[in-house]
Amino acid sequence: MKGPDFAAIAGLIIDDIVLPTGETRMGVPGGSGTHSVWGMRIWSESVGLIASYGEDCPAEILAAFDQAGIALLRAAANPEPTPRCWQVFEFDQHRTEIFRTSEADFYRFQPLVSDIPARWQKAAGFHLIHEAKNIPAFARHLRAGGVDCLLAEPPPTDFVPEKLDEFAAFLPLVDVFSPNWEESAQLLGIDNPDAILARFLEMGVPVVALRMGEAGSLVATAEQRWHIPAVPVRVVDVTGAGNSYCGGFLVGYAETGDPRIGGLYGAVSASFTIEQFGLPVIDGATNGLAKERLVRIADAL
Ligand SMILES: Nc1ncnc2c1ncn2[C@@H]1O[C@H](COP(=O)(O)OP(=O)(O)O)[C@@H](O)[C@H]1O
Ligand SMILES: [Mg+2]
């Protein structure tokens, strides 16, 4: 059986969402990998996630992947119980994440290189959501299998000056790096977005997509730079916007080889993620609506 065209590797989190009104949405799929593959699924019907989760993971969580048409592959080493978090929101969109299970276990039981089956090694694009120090091993393994396009997104906790050499080690091994502005400023000690882009390009990655929240994103290669605006939608919850942007970027870039198209796909994917709490519903109308949004921001450029 063929593996998915686009894949991500990450941990899975069960979210219990508390809205500022006191309403709750209990037990919904969350975590960076989940948001990424939903962002990919806006554009592609062949999408999968390799994730760590326990035996106890509720059937409704697994069913959500099924309903969205997203393959879910369970990693061998699994946190037990499945990582679970309160996501508590305020009216100003501020979010407080409270682990209900061991946070240390969540990081300890991330998927390994050995969790990637040979047929998944042939994906057109792979989103690596992993600690910076582990990205080189994943990148080498996936390249050996023939993956075309690798996008790296280390966790926010990696963006500290002491870990700069870990970034220097993986950047030449991937095709796209997508950090956010504040985290990059913290890592590099530079605030100016153009200077940040220049620095990462110098470190050997061919394409950088710098995420800047409502200001959109800056996509850069050594030769060219584009500003990609955010899609104007009603913002309800920005959780996962960056992950979803990365998922969309990967599909757009892998399919066209054009970094600007990658950025446009990413912005559209993110717009679907931020319109509601939790994940967007993907149905027969989604792809058409996505294409309309893409044309709208492409025309504005
Ligand atoms: N407050 C917002 N208003 C409108 N669009 C947003 C907002 N926050 C995020 N986005 C969209 O999602 C994309 C990725 O979000 P961003 O905040 O840059 O990532 P992260 O929070 O992961 O660093 C942005 O480039 C933009 O298109
Ligand atoms: Mg943000």
Image (spheres, rainbow, N blue to C red):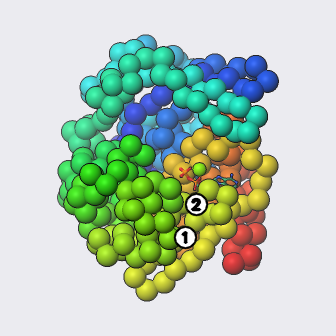
Residue type, label 1:
Leu
Q: Nearer the viewer, residue 66 or 236?
A: 236
Dot label at residue 212: 2
Q: Residue at x 62, y 34 (%)?
A: 95
* Residue 125, image x, y percentages: 40, 58
Whether ligand 1 has any atom under 8 Å from the Cβ at mark 2 is answered as: yes
The image quarter in which residue 26 lies:
top right
Q: Position of residue 225 (x, y in %)?
A: 52, 80
The N terminus - image quarter: top left
Residue receiving disc 1 = 218
| Left or right: 171 in relation to 4 | left
Q: Residue furthest bottom?
A: 223
Q: Which residue shows up at 76% across the image and 59% down it?
A: 232
Write the residue at 69% across / 78% down: 301
Q: Residue at x 36, y 69 (%)?
A: 200
Placement of 50 over or under 169, stated as above or below:
above
> What is the x, y in percent for residue 69?
56, 39
